[in-house]
Amino acid sequence: MSQISGVVITLDEADNIEACLTSLARVCEELIVVDSGSSDDTVVIAERFGARVIHQPYLGDGPQKNVGPQAASHRWVLSLDADERLTDGAVAAIQALDLDAAANGERSHDAYALRRRNFVGSRWIRHCGWYPDYCIRLFDRERTGFSDSRQHASVQAQTAKRLDADLEHYSFANLGELFGKASGRFSNRAAKIMYLKGKRANAFSPFLHGANAFVRKYVFQRGFLGGLDGVSVALSAAVNAYLKYAKLLELQRDPKVRDAEDFDRIW
């Protein structure tokens, strides 16, 4: 198997970084942490673990995630978020890959995707479109990389292959955090990005987008099969959609609110 560089971006991830690096170290010969100014022990823990730390003020999701691969020693990069972990199945699937193999004189795949198990607390959410949530995490940095999107960037692979294996994503500690992030920084960030892009809302936009998000998650993506967690995920999606358009409308209509925002610091 080709050697792999493991990369993770961080900001105040002291509670997560050791477990993430332990996971990466199962298949990676090199570990790189791109830190955007942590005030906790993230950097200390990463360096103690043997990772190379690159200090980089936050550039937005895609540009930040491209910093580590550009500095990597190996051609193949495994990029995880700090709250993601490889399962035993994912480790086995990656170790079984012949990344140096050629097909018709060329490498057959430029990236590999894993299914992501998204958790609230210790509960795996299997509905609401949260599983299978395929994400490209292993890629050939000489042929592809993350998009330049500053929000929810993804690897722009041309010949990605889906692996029959999962990784785990512990993004929300509890339901309170699920709703807090949806109503707080997630919706704030989205509203500011939409405003800067020239997108505009009207009085009906918050309600329509909020209702659409709930129906999509709860009905079409079968959140109703997930009990309380299914309802909660659908409601949090509705809250996020409602508030980002309500906040966009507020930015349009209220100069006092708009002038108080620092649009140079979206993140």
Image (cartoon, rainbow, N blue to C red):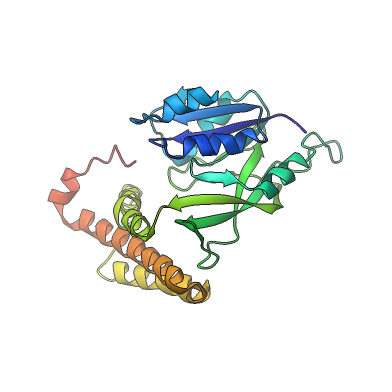
Residue 176 percent coordinates (x, y): 33, 58
Residue 160 percent coordinates (x, y): 69, 48
**Which quadrant holds the N terminus?**
top right
**Which quadrant holds the C terminus?**
top left
- In the rendered image, which quarter is residue 111 located in? top right
Q: Name the residue: 41% across, 53% down.
A: 173
Front in this rendered view, residue 116 or 61: 116
Q: Name the residue: 53% across, 26% down.
A: 49
Q: Name the residue: 64% across, 44% down.
A: 157
- In the rendered image, which quarter is residue 61 located in? top left
Q: Name the residue: 52% across, 75% down.
A: 225
- In the rendered image, which quarter is residue 138 located in? top right
The image shows residue 48, relative to residue 228, as above or below, that is above
Front in this rendered view, residue 262 or 216: 216
Whether residue 63 is visible to the viewer of this picture, yes or no, is no
Front in this rendered view, residue 64 or 172: 172
Whether residue 249 is visible to the viewer of this picture, yes or no, is yes
Q: How many marks?
A: 0
Residue 98 percent coordinates (x, y): 80, 38
Residue 58 percent coordinates (x, y): 39, 33
